[in-house]
Image: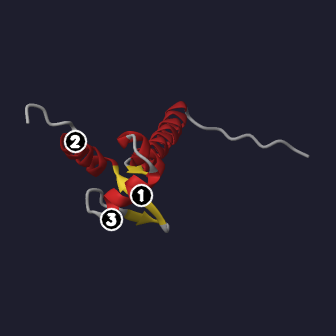
Amino acid sequence: MGETFIIIRPDELKKLIREEVRQERERISLIEKEKQAESEWLTRKEVKDIFNVSLGTVDNLSRDGVLKKHYLGGSPRFKREEVLGALAAYNKYQSPKTGV
């Protein structure tokens, strides 16, 4: 079996390497964007932990319109941004009233 050698000029090699690096950076960037997008969605358990309530309470908050439930692949998910906004309102509502 004979070996095959490819002759390439240094400037062509640089160009090939730069293109491969560019493509790899794009691939990594896409992966990071996908991970970030995934982290924008919370499960019921994650919402439960944020609110420090039971899963049943998370369901009640969703049913009552405090939390907006979305479905991704048939599984309920909540947008992090919406959950944090609802948490502020929930904490204000739940805080004990003083001086009454």
Q: Which residue is mark 2?
A: 88
Q: Amino acid at mark 2?
A: Ala
Query: Which of 52 and 29 lies nearest the eye of the viewer?
Result: 52
Q: Residues within 10 Å of mark 1 (few under 14, many from 20)?
A: many
The mark that comes first in sequence, 1 or 2, is: 1
Disc 1 from disc 3: Cα separation: 14 Å
Residue plotted at (83% across, 41% down): 3
SS at circle 2: helix
The furthest residue to the front: 100
Which of the two marks, 1 or 3, is nearer to us in this view? 3
Residue 43 visible here = no
Do the residues under discs 1 and 3 have CB atoms within 8 angstroms? no
The numbered dot on residue 63 is 3
Residue 1, percent from left and from top: 91, 46
Q: Which one is nearer the viewer's eye here, 59 or 69? A: 59
Pick the quarter of the image with the C terminus.
top left
- Name which of mark 1 and mark 3 comes first in the sequence: 3
Where 3 sits versus 68, above or below?
above
Between residue 26 and residue 74, name the one nearer to us: 74
Q: Is residue 78 left or right of residue 75?
A: left
> Which residue sits at x=44%, y=50%?
38
Callout 1: SS: strand
Mark earlier in primary sequence (3, 2): 3
Q: Amino acid at mark 3?
A: Arg
**80 above or below 99?**
below
Are discs 3 and 2 less than 8 Å apart at CB? no
Question: Which residue position holds label 1?
Answer: 77
